[in-house]
Amino acid sequence: MNTNYFWSVYQLDTAPSLDGLVDVVITVHYGRTAVEGEYTAYTYGTMGCQTPSETDFTAYPDLTFEQICSWLDAGLDVESIDAGLQQDIDNQINPPVIVLPLPWQPEPTTTTTTTMAPPPPEPTTTSTTTEAPI
C-alpha cells in the first residue's frame, strides 16, 4: 500500500522590519502527515527561515501555500521526517510492544443483567354511597 505525505502550515512568524524589508517570515510552524489506508502519523515542527535578499523576497500578502511548502522541502530533511512517519505507521500496523493481561489474574468477565420494570399497580376502584335525607 502507498503512503501519502502532505504539509500543513499553521503559522508564519514575521519580523515587522528586517534589512529594509517589511513583514519578513522568520519562522514557519508546520505539520507533516502521512496516511496509509486507515493509518495516520503526524509530526509538528518549526523551521527558521534565512533572511531573503531584495531580489528573492516575496511580499507577505503575495506568499502562497505552495511557496511555503517549497521552503519546507528545501530547508528540512524531508526524507528523515517521512521515514519517521512511516515507522510510526508500521508500528501501528505491527505493534512492536503489546500489553498482555497479568497471567496470575483472571481475565475480567462481562455479565449482562436484565432488569425488568415492576408491573404497573392494579387500578383501584372506590365507591361512595350517599343516602338521600328523608
Image (tube, rainbow, N blue to C red):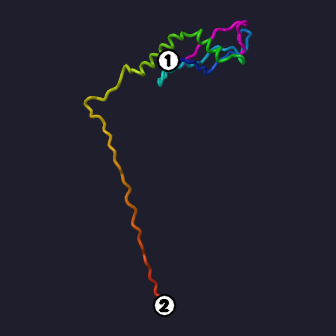
Question: Looking at this rendering, what residue extends furthest in the front direction?
Answer: 1
Position of residue 55 in the picture relative to residue 29 (left or right): right
Q: Is residue 78 magenta?
A: no
SS assignment for the magenta stretch, majority? loop
- Label tally: 2
Q: Residues within 10 Å of mark 1 (few under 14, many from 20)?
A: some
Q: Residues within 10 Å of mark 2 (few under 14, many from 20)?
A: few
Q: Secondary structure at mark 2?
A: loop
Position of residue 84 in the picture relative to residue 73 (left or right): left
Q: Amino acid at mark 1?
A: Thr
Q: Amino acid at mark 2?
A: Pro
The label shown at residue 64 is none
Image spot of residue 97 (x, y percent): 36, 21
The residue singled out by tag 2 in the image is 133
Residue 63: image quadrant is: top right
Q: Which residues are magenta?
A: 43-59
Image spot of residue 131 (x, y percent): 46, 87
Question: Looking at this rendering, what residue extends furthest in the right direction?
Answer: 20
**Vertical comparison of 79 with 104: above or below:** above
Q: Secondary structure at mark 1?
A: loop
Q: Is residue 58 magenta?
A: yes
Q: Residue at x 34, y 26 (%)?
A: 99
Image spot of residue 119 (x, y percent): 38, 60
Q: State the CA–CA distance, disc 1 to disc 2.
A: 99 Å
The residue singled out by tag 1 in the image is 3
